[in-house]
Image (cartoon, rainbow, N blue to C red):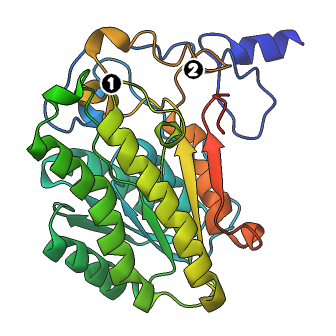
Amino acid sequence: MTDQQNDQNGPDQTIDQYAMQDPTKMYADKKPDEQYLEGSGTDAEMAENVPADHGEDTYRGAGRLTGRKALITGGDSGIGAAVAIAYAREGADVAIGYLPEEQEDADRIIGLIEAAGAKAVAIPGDITSLEFCEQLVATAVEQLGGLDILVNNAGKQQNIDSITDISDDEFDETFKTNVYATFRITKAAVPHMPAGSTIINTTSIQAYAPSPNLVHYAATKATVNNLAKGLAAQLAPKGIRVNAVAPGPIWTPLQPAGGQAPDALPSVGEETFLGRWGQPAELAPAYVFLASGESSFVVGETLHVNGGMPTP
């Protein structure tokens, strides 16, 4: 390894999606301490401590999605924000759905989409509502002039150690956010999607290796994963490809907002082969690949981006 490569991979390394870098040393400056964010959490709050990397300063597009029209749920922060930035820089117009209380995050991502020369559409609302799920798709189709990429990404995760402490309301809201919304939004979107369109569900390592403190969340992600595979078979004859991405531990607002216990945050990621948290920017290329024509023969696939966590 050269001195230059060592410099690039140290604590102050410059991340470059196209450069050869030591993945065990990347993001050495982004190890969180104990913290807790109220509500759903925001990237704006995380930036006060350890900000996540969404590829704002690093993602370079190559026209892989020129002319495409994408809707991303949870597109204001975390993985969804990284995907929104990447899609815009690849040439797609992008609509993002998000909770109204996350407006600050959404405004920032809308600005980055527009800075890439793409059209940006902001659609605030709560995806646990059937009415909003239908409105979300209708607005995206109207404002974008069509729809050919759907990313079902928004999610709810709360760590609870015992099943006896999971309330019916908590269980219900988790399924409404992660499963019902995916079903409802996809159902509303499919009639608008021409042949060549793609649908990508965000599942999780939890669908394959559930943690004992995330049993209800893990159950939703297994459902979302299975839904993608069943829909892939159903929609492939129409020329619509359905796939999924299964992240491992990724540093997003979902984690300090109850997704993990505050005292666990400093050590999460150590169980991966790379021994660290992943960053949203490291997920974006997977979503670009699955949305682009480069993956034309990839159908019903779950693409694991988890730092090396074995899956069945």
The relative height of residue 70 versus residue 124 in the rendered view (above or below) is: below
Q: Which of marks 1 and 2 precedes in the sequence?
A: 2
Viewer-proximal residue, 196 or 90? Answer: 196
How far from the left and from the top, in percent, is residue 4? 82, 15
How packed is label 2: few (under 14 Cα within 10 Å), some, or many (20 or more)? many
- The residue tagged 1 is 213
Asked whether the residues under the numbered discs 2 and 1 touch, taking CB atoms below 8 Å apart as contact, a structural biologist would say no
Viewer-proximal residue, 193 or 280? Answer: 193
- Element type where label 1 sits in the image: loop
How far from the left and from the top, in percent, is residue 291? 61, 67
- The residue tagged 2 is 27
Query: To which quarter of the image does residue 208 belong?
Result: top right
Mark nearest the camera among 2 and 1 is: 1
**Residue 34 visible in the picture:** no
Q: Residue at x 56, y 57 (%)?
A: 244
Q: Residue at x 70, y 39 (%)?
A: 17
Amino acid carrying label 1: it is Asn
Q: Is residue 1 left or right of residue 102?
A: right
Q: Quadrant of the N terminus?
A: top right
How far from the left and from the top, in percent, is residue 175? 26, 53
The relative height of residue 199 versus residue 289 in the rendered view (above or below) is: below
Q: Is residue 6 left or right of residue 79?
A: right
Query: CA gap, disc 2 to disc 1?
Result: 27 Å
